[in-house]
Amino acid sequence: MEKCLSPEEQQTKINEVRKMIGSIADKLPDICSEASILRYLRARSWNTAKAGKMLKQTIKWRLDYKPENIRWEDIAREAETGKIYRANYFDKFGRAVLIMRPGFQNTNVVSGQIKYLVYCMENAIINLKSDQEQMVWLVDFQNWNTSSISIKATRETANVLQNHYPERLGFGILYNPPKIFESFWKMVKPFIEPKTFKKVKFVYSNNPQSQKIMEELFDMDKLESSFGGRNSVSFDYEAYAQRMKEDEKNMSNLINSRSSSPSLVSETHQLSEALASDLGSDGDEVKSSSDDEIIPSDLVLDDEKTPDRSELHNDGKDVVNSNIK
């Protein structure tokens, strides 16, 4: 059960983490903001040492990976099939919506797939409403089959989302997953944070009870028909490309003003090296799923290992329940 801390107690925790981060916090105000630190604290159950370590790892990752510098032309090929895209509407609670269609995978290089995922996450975040910091993921299993499963991509995806975008998922919908996917879901459960696992729900179009989740979350006139809504408009690559380019244009001045700061540019490598040294010298470093959480390759999906759907629903994903918001 999650701790319930008073505002004063939360502020004390925030201050402790900021002290751990040191002067870097002043150089990177967005990632080290109070709202950001709170997300890391919640992700680590208010353990300041673990939250501080996790935040340091994200800072180093952002300094090295530079997600804010990814541009449409870098990932345009990945976006062609609409396997991931930001919807042009919000849910009823003002959360951005990411549509994911794993059956529409069109590339084989995991690094490119992860870069596109990061691009989509960054774009969704900059489009969040001012009073909202979480998003909804809608996963459509059309065309999905076992050949769509990539253990490496799954591991890297979990690593990036859990370690560098903590507490960004408000709710996740797995829409019409085939029975065999339920076995895969049970298989990866040990490698997903319990908090995240409980935010994900299985929804089936032929189950009116589960379909109520969609009605509680979305304006059905805006929701795509593939998710049971009344919007028949499908993914339009050219229109989406234009939307993304407009977003980039709107953000370019802000990003350029930050990245062109002589002091920040000259210190980036130094900051990254200092963080690497700091993280490497600490014995209780937060583990990265990409290095430590390896899904056993000898796990086989077959009918004997496929759990009943009732078992799945009793394991934190019952079809209509609390925590929609």
Image: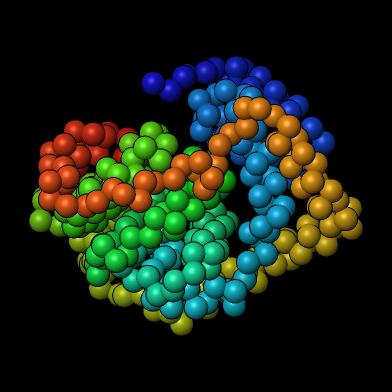
Q: Is residue 49 left or right of residue 233?
A: right
Is residue 276 among what the camera can see?
yes
Instruction: In this rendered view, identify the residue nearer to me: 154 or 213.
Output: 154
Q: Is residue 87 above or below residue 202?
A: below
From the viewer's perspective, tell me whether residue 80 is left or right of residue 50: left
Seen from this angle, which residue lies furthest bottom?
238
Q: Residue at x 42, y 65 (%)?
A: 84
Q: Is residue 228 above or below residue 143?
A: above
How is the rendered protein coloured? Answer: rainbow
Where is residue 288? Give x, y as percent: 55, 42
Quadrant placement of the C terminus: top left
Q: Residue furthest front?
A: 298
Q: Is residue 168 at least partly visible in the picture? A: no
Left or right: where 112 falls relative to 144: right
Q: Quadrant of residue 285?
A: top right
276 and 134: which one is in front? 276
Determine which quarter of the picture holds residue 252: bottom right
**Residue shown at the point (30%, 44%) measured from the top left:** 187
- Above or below, comparing residue 146 to residue 61 in the picture: below
**Which residue does the image show at 52% across and 57% down from the upper left?**
121
Q: Position of residue 217 (x, y in %)?
A: 30, 49
Residue 143 % position (x, y) = 24, 70
